[in-house]
Image: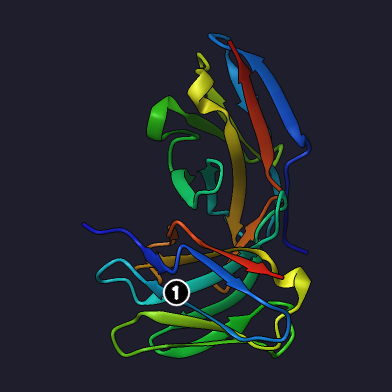
Amino acid sequence: EAGVTQSPTHLIKTRGQQATLRCSPISGHTSVYWYQQALGLGLQFLLWYDEGEERNRGNFPPRFSGRQFPNYSSELNVNALELEDSALYLCASRRGYSTDTQYFGPGTRLTVL
Amino acid sequence: AQSVAQPEDQVNVAEGNPLTVKCTYSVSGNPYLFWYVQYPNRGLQFLLKYITGDNLVKGSYGFEAEFNKSQTSFHLKKPSALVSDSALYFCAVRRSNYQLIWGAGTKLIIKP
């Protein structure tokens, strides 16, 4: 069974640009979570999608947005990039409400110059 | 308020010695508890979880965790540490809305 995949592995942008990060969940998983992990820090919850709907979002400005497609893959968009957006962005997927375990992808390292 | 605490930023253990990484939680109702490990520049890997049943949960790579309801703790343990166990460890508890609350992480350093 293939794990959660994320692309690209690394992304370098300049301040003010937009970044798009992609995530493909494990087959059969309908929920996708996005987290931000700044260097040396813990996980900050960004967004949760399930069955194509945004279920919850963390304490981040509206320039962080995303969507979930009919095949349950997901996209995270970050507009008007700021230097402090530089971080590892992690995607996790979960099968459904009866199974709580989130499985993580390898992450996308976003660097904003 | 629901929360998870990992009281130690870093734990140092000699190779071959037992290790413990501490986690305490505060949540209403029955807790669903998780441990994950993160190696440098990698995503998180699921180690083990407690949902119900036996208080001692066995997981991947020889790790186990002990659920203690009276002390609201879920400490991660391993009888004999390996240098390759050096990593960042995260404890998490499930909220009522199916999201996870994460601890700040504990850096485990195993010295040869």
Q: Nearer the viewer, residue B89 or B111?
A: B111
Residue sitting at x 56%, y 42%: B40
- Image vertical order of residue B55 relative to residue A13, above or below: above
Badge 1: chain ID? A
Name the residue tied to disc 1.
Answer: A32
In the rendered view, does B63 fall on the left or right side of A4? right
Q: Nearer the viewer, residue B29 or A27?
A: A27
Residue A2, located in which quarter of the rendered image? bottom left
In the rendered image, the vertical position of residue A77 relative to residue B35, given as above or below: below
Of the 4 image quadrants, the one containing the C terminus of chain A is bottom right
Quarter of the image that includes the N terminus of chain A? bottom left
Residue B52 visible in the shown view: no
Find residue B108 and report its horizontal and vertical position in percent.
Answer: 64, 29
Q: Residue at x 65, y 86 (%)?
A: A17
Give the SS element for disc 1: strand
Indicate the amino acid at tag 1: Val
Q: Residue A29, how many percent across, how many down?
A: 32, 71
Q: Is residue A110 left or right of residue A6?
A: right
* As drawn, B92 above or below A57: above
Horizontal side of residue B50 vs B111, given as left or right: left
Q: Which residue: 50% across, 35% down? A: B55
Q: Residues within 10 Å of mark 1 (few under 14, many from 20)?
A: many
Quadrant housing residue A63? bottom right
**Which residue is rendered at x = 72% and y = 52% of the image?**
A41
Q: Nearer the viewer, residue B47 or B38?
A: B38
Number of on-image labels: 1
The image's colour scheme reads rainbow
Q: Provide residue A107's location: percent of width, then percent of height.
A: 49, 60
